[in-house]
Structures are given as C-alpha cells and as structure tokens.
Image (tube, rainbow, N blue to C red):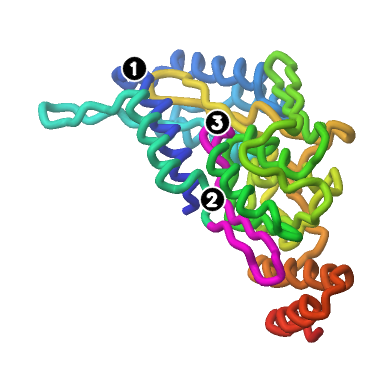
C-alpha cells in the first residue's frame, strides 16, 4: 500500500480519536437521526449537488431494521451511496470503541499523533525519493507524495537547486499517491518566470473558489521557463500529483509521458456523525481556471502514451533527441548518440 495511504490512516485515526466514546445503540429513531445528519452534510458539502439530491430519497426510504450492528449499518449506508453516486470516496466509516481495562494503553492525543505524522514526513524526506543528474545533463526528481508547502519547502528548494543547471527535467510521479494541494503551486512555481494562474480550488460549502498562482519567490533556485519539463505518470498517480500534471499540461509547460492517471480531483473531508461514525465526503475540486474542467473519473491523459515501466526511458530519448539537434559541440553530440544507443533508441 502506498505510503500516503498509511499517513491518511494515521490522520483518520487522529480525527476519529477525538470523538467521545459511548455505548452503541440501534433503535430506529437513532438510525433515522443519523440519516438526517448524513443527508444534511451531503446537501451542504458534497461536491456533486445533483448526486446528493438523488441520494437523499434513497437513504430516507431505506429499511435498516434488519441491520444488527452499527458497523453493519455503516457498510450498508456506504453501499447505498456507492450504488447511486459511483463515488468510492464517499463512505460512512465505523470506528470500534477503544479497549477497556486497567492494562489498556491510553489513546494518543491529537497533538501527539500530529507530532508523529511530522516525524514520519521528515523520515520519508517529505516524499522526495531521488534527486539525480542523468547522463546528458538531464535532471531527475522522483517524489512519492506531496507534503504541505510549509513542511516540504526547504527540501523541495534543496532538490531544485541541485537540478537548476540541467538542460531538461523529468519529474517522476508514477508512484505518487497525492498529498496536500498547496504543494502543487509550490513545485509549479519553479517552472515559470512570471506569476501564473495554474488552478482554481472550488469548495461547494460556502460556494468558495480559491485561486492557485505560482509564487514570485521560491526556496532555492528557480528552474526557469525555458528548459523543458517532462512528467512521468502511471495508473497509480493520484490526487494532488494529478493536479500538477493537469495544470502543467494545460499550460503547455510540461510533456506528460506514461499512462492515464487514476482520476481523483475531489479532495475529501471527514465529518463526525456520532461517537463511532464519520462521513468521508469529497467536498471540493481542483479545476482549470479557464475551462472549469477537472480530471475526476477520467484522469490526466499522457501526451506520449507508453507503459509506466518504459516512461523514464522514453522521456530521456525524447529529451536527448532534442538536445542533439540543438547542441553544436561535436563531443557533446557524440556523447548523446552513445547514450541514445544505450537507451535502445537505435540512433
């Protein structure tokens, strides 16, 4: 399982741990009250208002009299929501009560769990797995998740400083499961010389639109707007990682090489319903500021479609072929030809 998923589980545990524990009950009146709360949240915050309207009568008419536990109730509600919306991110989650007894360890506080999450981010280098200068003066940055801009800024700045003098850059998102949305404008800012509007984040509750722009100041060295950027994608590329590919592709600032991504443009929030139940619900979307389209359910299609395992080789070949046409030094030309043969291009 992807590391980002593990962190989401920790965060979810932290959020659910603040719910007060109480005895489980299951009368029809309580179930009806829970459905009422879910319907209210859906009608207020679920990103797809039309699906929320379709879901309301289904939930209100449902018969839960034969559902004998709160956990089974949560699974039943989740199945109904999935059947109507086809949205796997919309679910009612159940958390069992904490263990009781003298030997039971006290649950960590939210502050303790947040501190642990920060330590995990540091240990995993804020998602940055590899920073490398490949043959031919090609920069390579592999990142497996996006930490928040505030936390990852120094590490991103250090990586980009090492890559600033390369002739082209490959950003490998093939194993990136997403993360925080503010990492997208941070990384995008290295590839533009002027302030650029890259995306809009729309939140249904309150009808709020937050514009995302590149920043005129970045940690470390800017890569600039002239040298080419290539982004590697796979079927695993998800969420905020898709957001970076989507934005840079739309602005014609990057060439996408690999596979169509998973198609998750709707970030979710978690709202407590009662002591053991919480509703996970997509409440917002990142979309193109001009077309107002996003990539939910369809993913980001590559400009150069190849199996994910071949994407790094193909991107290097594309870059080297362009560099060979541009470089005048005979020795550099010879090095490029040799490297292309090593990569199997037949050049």
Residue 142 among those drawn in magenta? yes
Residue 209 among those drawn in magenta? no
- The residue that label 2 is drawn on is 128
Q: Nearer the viewer, mark 1 or mark 2?
A: 2
Identify which residue is drawn at 36% across, 24% down. Answer: 110
The part of the image, by quadrant, that contains residue 137 is bottom right
Q: How many discs appear? A: 3
Q: Are marks 1 and 2 in contact (CB under 8 Å)?
A: no
Q: Residue furthest left?
A: 102
The part of the image, by quadrant, that contains residue 305 is bottom right
Identify which residue is drawn at 71% across, 79% down. Answer: 339
When the figure is inspected, residue 101 is found, relative to residue 177, above or below; the finding is above
Spatial distance from mark 2 to mark 3, Cα to Cα? 15 Å
Segment colored magenta: 130-152
Q: Are marks 2 and 3 in contact (CB under 8 Å)?
A: no
Can you tell which mark lies on residue 20?
Answer: 1
Q: Nearer the viewer, residue 256 or 166?
A: 166
When the figure is inspected, residue 151 is found, relative to residue 49, above or below; the finding is below
Where does the C terminus fall, quadrant-wise?
A: bottom right
Horizontal and vertical percent position of residue 193: 81, 39
For label 1, the crowd category at 10 Å Cα-Cα, with few meaning under 14, some 14 to 19 and many 20 or more, is few
Identify which residue is drawn at 42% across, 35% down. Answer: 118
Q: Nearer the viewer, residue 111 or 42?
A: 111
Q: Is residue 308 left or right of residue 294?
A: left
For residue 21, say whether it is visible.
yes
């Amino acid at each position: 399982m992807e590391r980002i998923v593990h962190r989401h589980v920790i965060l979810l545990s932290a959020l659910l741990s603040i719910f007060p524990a109480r005895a489980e009950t299951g009368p029809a009146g309580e179930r009806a009250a829970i459905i009422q709360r879910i319907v209210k949240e859906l009608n207020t915050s679920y990103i797809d208002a039309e699906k929320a309207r379709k879901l309301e009568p289904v939930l209100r008419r449902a018969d839960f009299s034969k559902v004998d536990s709160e956990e089974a109730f949560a699974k039943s509600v989740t199945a109904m929501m999935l059947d109507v919306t086809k949205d796997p991110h919309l679910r009612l989650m159940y958390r069992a009560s904490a263990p009781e007894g003298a030997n039971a360890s006290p649950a960590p506080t939210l502050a303790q769990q947040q501190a642990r999450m920060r330590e995990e981010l540091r240990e995993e280098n804020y998602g940055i797995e590899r920073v490398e200068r490949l043959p031919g003066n090609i920069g390579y940055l592999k990142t497996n998740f996006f930490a928040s801009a505030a936390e990852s800024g120094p590490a991103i700045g250090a990586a980009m400083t090492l890559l600033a003098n390369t002739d082209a850059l490959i950003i490998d998102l093939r194993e990136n499961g997403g993360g925080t949305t503010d990492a997208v404008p941070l990384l995008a800012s290295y590839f533009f010389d002027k302030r650029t509007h890259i995306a809009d984040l729309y939140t249904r509750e309150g009808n709020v639109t937050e514009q995302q722009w590149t920043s005129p100041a970045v940690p470390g060295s800017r890569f600039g707007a002239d040298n080419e950027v290539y982004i590697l994608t796979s079927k695993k590329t998800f969420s905020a990682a898709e957001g970076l590919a989507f934005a840079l592709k739309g602005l014609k600032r990057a060439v996408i090489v690999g596979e169509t991504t998973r198609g998750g443009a709707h970030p979710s929030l978690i709202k407590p319903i009662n002591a053991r139940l919480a509703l996970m619900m997509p409440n917002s979307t990142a979309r193109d500021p001009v077309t107002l389209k996003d990539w939910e359910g369809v993913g980001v299609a590559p400009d150069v479609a190849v199996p994910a395992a071949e994407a790094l080789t193909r991107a290097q070949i594309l870059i080297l072929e362009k560099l060979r046409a541009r470089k005048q030094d005979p020795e550099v030309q010879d090095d490029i030809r040799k490297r292309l043969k090593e990569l199997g291009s037949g050049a």
